[in-house]
Amino acid sequence: MRSQMKRKIVTGMLFVMVIGLLSGCRKKQEKAPETEAVTEAETEAVPVETEIADTHEGEAESYLTGEWILAEQANKRPIALMVENTKVTLPQYGLNRAGIIYECPVEGGITRLMALFQDYSGMDVIGNVRSCRPYYVNFAKEYDAIYMHAGASNEGTELLNASGIDHIDGITGQGGKSYYRDKSRKAPHNLYTSSDGIDSGIASYAFRREHDSSYSGHFQFAPEDAAVTLPNGVDAAVVSLYFRDPKPWFEYHADDQLYYRYEFGNPQMDAIDQSQIAVRNIILQECRSSFYDKSAGTLNLDCFSGGSGKYITNGKCIDITWKRESDSAITRYYDLSGNEITLNRGKTWIGIIQSSYADENHIYGTKEEFESSR
């Protein structure tokens, strides 16, 4: 009897235990979908892509700088404006609004600038404006730009007529209404343009204002959260260029990662915002040179055959190569492993260097080295 009682008690206890285990399993099975649902919902609630997109709502990346600008500005064709760079014309107006600046040698050891503007709105004074040289036409075409100048060399005129580039001349044609002279300065150093003048010239010629659908930009830019650092590059605290007249150089500021421009022994300033001209990237593009007319010193720069150069950013410098397939193609720049370079977002200065003078450019690791060399 006791044995039967024991068996009943044990059997009863086992039954309770089994029921308990089964109940616990059911509860776990019921709760599991809730945990998965919560995890999935949290993942969907805060997607990184949505946060980034919301940050730049109504904006698009600039073809010239990679920076975020108003979407309605992003597909506008840029203006490529010829700017004088002699001491008598300083300070220039508006260079800090340019996304890209080209500096090339012209006659007599001087240089001339071509400033590319994607957004030139609200500017009453830009320039001063000087004449065309043929290689600038070739550079402007790379950006689908509207080229602005005041006259041209004989070779420049020939190329303007042959190239079909949209251009606004301040000396001939309907372009005169786009420019004005500042009587407080002496001619020919006193010709300027403005936002209204540019728009007037574009309207006069009925030029296309937007890039067509085939245009995809000139450079590739680094992501916002992954700056180009050139870890294998040499230190580049100061970049000194050979150009005889302006004797320009750039000094790197680590605090804002910009290169500040100097020439004629002083900071190069923008008269509009009263600040020193500064850029994020520097490209030195070495080109073979010859003379159209040696007696006049009229240069011919070969911007098609390819060559060597330097890419400088974030306080570092690497050797590069460049090539351009045709006059309708874009110049591409490559590191020595053959990879196309990526630029940091921001303004870029492109110095066109005569190959025969390239060894007169100097990259200094520290500002003290530069100062001791002067």
Image (tube, rainbow, N blue to C red):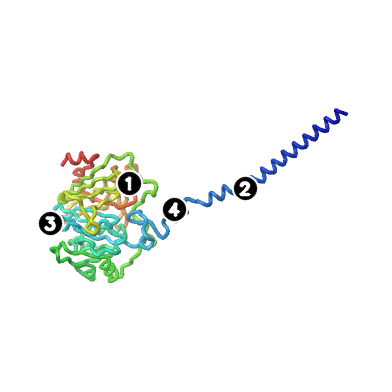
Q: Looking at the picture, which amino acid does disc 2 mark?
A: Glu
Question: Which quadrant of the figure contains the C terminus?
Answer: top left
Give the mark nearest the N terminus, 4 or 1. Answer: 4
Give residue 334's mark.
1
Q: Looking at the picture, which amino acid does disc 4 mark?
A: Ile
Q: Is residue 241 above or below residue 274?
A: above
Give residue 34's mark.
2
Q: Position of residue 137 (x, y in %)?
A: 25, 59
Which residue is more in the foreground, 41 or 362?
41
- Alpha-carbon span between mark 1 and mark 3: 35 Å
According to the image, label 3 marks what residue? Answer: 296
Callout 1 secondary element: strand
Toward the right, the furthest residue is: 1
Check if mark 1's residue and mark 3's residue have beta carbons within 8 Å: no
Q: Position of residue 174 (x, y in %)?
A: 23, 71
Which residue is more in the foreground, 35 or 288?
35
Give the mark nearest the N terminus, 3 or 2. Answer: 2
Q: Looking at the picture, which amino acid does disc 1 mark?
A: Tyr
According to the image, label 4 marks what residue? Answer: 52
Check if mark 2's residue and mark 4's residue have beta carbons within 8 Å: no
The residue under the point 86% across, 30% down is 4
- Alpha-carbon span between mark 2 and mark 4: 30 Å
Callout 3 secondary element: loop
Which residue is more in the foreground, 200 or 42?
42
Which of label 2 and label 4 is nearer to you?
A: 2
The residue under the point 26% across, 55% down is 101
Callout 2 secondary element: helix
Which of label 1 and label 2 is nearer to you?
A: 2
Disc 1 crowd, CA 10 A, few/some/many (<14, 14-19, 20+): some
Can the viewer see residue 131 in this picture? no
